Image (cartoon, grey):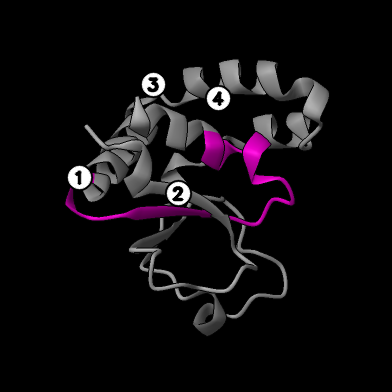
């Protein structure tokens, strides 16, 4: 199981550091205005992202986060998303994993939900 210290959540717009390890974008949509070089990603795991319908419903409204998390955890049981989540779990066992997201508040993002599950 991955430990708290080897899984991080960071904004795509933050400077890349040597502490990031594997950098994986977990959003379905590419971060606006960010070049691929600047993002410095090891991979883009779209399959683990919330459905478009759930993402649009949530709209990163802090008052909806609890319900978003419940619905998203349910979506993550879908075989394709579960496989993508297992892939991230496997990466985290090997070295530090940084889940990258474009959201303004990573603490109430899909990446935060993923990190919680991976640590868990």
Residue at (55% x, 55% y) in the render: 10
Closer to viewer: mark 1 or mark 4: 1
Question: Tag 2 or tag 3, which sits nearer the N-term?
Answer: 2
Question: Tag 4 or tag 2, which sits nearer the N-term?
Answer: 2
Q: Is residue 48 above or below residue 91?
A: above
Q: Which residue is mark 4?
A: 72
Q: Considering the numbered disc 3 on the image, is that residue within a helix, a strand or a loop?
A: loop
What's the distance in space between the residues labelled 4 and 3, CA to CA? Answer: 9 Å
- Which quadrant would residue 84 be assigned to in this image? top left
Q: Considering the numbered disc 4 on the image, is that residue within a helix, a strand or a loop?
A: helix
Q: Which residues are magenta?
A: 93-112
What's the distance in space between the residues labelled 1 and 4, CA to CA? Answer: 23 Å
Residue 98 drawn in magenta: yes
Question: Tag 2 or tag 1, which sits nearer the N-term?
Answer: 2
Q: Is residue 23 above or below residue 90?
A: below
For label 4, count other residues whose C-alpha is less than 10 Å away and answer few (under 14), some (14-19) or many (20+).
Answer: many
For label 1, count other residues whose C-alpha is less than 10 Å away and answer few (under 14), some (14-19) or many (20+).
Answer: some
Closer to viewer: mark 3 or mark 2: 2
Question: Tag 4 or tag 1, which sits nearer the N-term?
Answer: 4
Q: Is residue 32 left or right of residue 1?
A: right
Q: Position of residue 14 (x, y in %)?
A: 62, 68
Q: Is residue 69 above or below residue 89?
A: above
């Amino acid at each position: 199981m991955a430990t708290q210290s080897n899984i991080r959540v960071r904004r795509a717009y933050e400077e890349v550091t040597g502490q990031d390890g594997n950098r994986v974008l977990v959003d379905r949509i590419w971060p606006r205005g960010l070049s691929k070089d600047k993002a410095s990603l090891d991979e883009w795991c779209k399959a683990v992202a919330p459905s478009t319908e759930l993402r649009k419903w949530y709209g990163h409204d802090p008052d909806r986060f609890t319900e978003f998390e419940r619905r998203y955890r349910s979506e993550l049981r879908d075989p394709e998303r579960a496989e993508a989540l297992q892939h991230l779990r496997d990466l985290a066992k090997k070295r530090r994993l940084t889940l990258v997201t474009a959201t303004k508040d990573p603490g109430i993002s899909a990446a935060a939900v993923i990190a919680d599950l991976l640590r868990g």
